[in-house]
Image (tube, grey):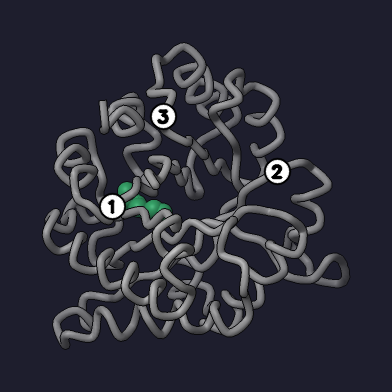
Amino acid sequence: MARTFFVGGNWKMNGSIQTSKDLVANLNKAQLDPNTEVVIAPPALHLLLVKDLVESSQVKISAQNAYHKASGAFTGEISVSQLKDAQVPWVIIGHSERRTLFGEADSNVAEKTKAALAESLSVILCVGETLEEREKNETVSVVVRQLDAVAAEVNDWSKIVVAYEPVWAIGTGKVATAEQAQEVHAAIRKWATEKLGSQVAEALRIIYGGSVAAKNCKELAGQPDIDGFLVGGASLKPEFVDIINARL
Ligand SMILES: O=C(COP(=O)(O)O)NO
């Protein structure tokens, strides 16, 4: 079964009301590969504005994070229930910046993923190793540990896209080579086959993130277990369209 190519744009904490409008305007007038599933994740403050401005049903929106409880005294947080109420269909969970800068542990990521799925949201689940862990040859064990934590709480993976994002490649311009990325994606596919079963593993989209750009996306997209991308910096530039069209 062919897996639908998936490209996410993680805008992170960037932009203004005007630049968000400009980015959507660029996407609205672009010729996008109809075989690519596109999800863009603006800052929370701009989510509903962007949602209203997106013209193509091919382009969906995502939150960059969410809290697992439905409501309560959690100042500053946005709940998975509020995302569902606002008809925001996707949420990124476990991004390395949430893990390293905001102290999200594997257990928090699992709890959030379970809660998001319970609200019928789709989840971009981020995993990936630090440079130190890679240099100690711990990459696969780290990624498996992160995935196992979610698998302990979640049975249905049909609405999860796994994003492998080596921390050392995020925002650095040091993109993983196609061979490096494929090696870890294949290990994730193997984990899924053993843990979730071959049918689920075959259907699971495993996307790569970490300095993806127009100049490197085609080689990466040609790898058998790379099903797309989660793009940071380049999603704020016109070249994001080239990445969406990487398989053309
Ligand atoms: O964090 C990333 C990748 O960021 P860059 O493309 O800027 O490396 N995606 O969620």
Q: Residue at x 75, y 64 (%)?
A: 118
Residue ID at (31%, 54%): 208
Q: Residues within 10 Å of mark 2 (few under 14, many from 20)?
A: many
- Residue annotated with mark 1: 226
Q: Quadrant of the C terminus?
A: top left
Q: Of 39 and 232, which appears nearest the observer?
A: 39
Give the amino acid at mark 2: Val
The residue at which mark 3 appears reads as 35
Q: Is residue 155 above or below residue 64?
A: below
Q: Which residue is mark 2?
A: 88
Q: Quadrant of residue 73?
A: bottom right
Considering only vertical position in the picture, is 214 above or below 94?
above
Report the residue that reaches farthest toward the top. 29
Q: Is residue 171 visible?
A: no
Marks 3 and 2: which is nearer the front?
3
| Label 2: element kind | loop
Answer with left or right where residue 50 lies relative to residue 38: right
Which residue is nearer to you in this view: 120 or 198? 198
Q: Disc 3 residue type?
A: Asn
SS for dot 1: loop
Amino acid at pointer 1: Ile
Disc 3: CA contacts within 10 A as few (<14), some (14-19) or many (>=20): some
Q: Which numbered disc, 1 or 3, marks the residue that appears first in the sequence?
A: 3
Cβ–Cβ under 8 Å for marks 3 and 2: no
**Percent from the top left, x then y, of residue 91?**
60, 54
**Disc 1 and disc 2: Cα gap in Å?**
26 Å
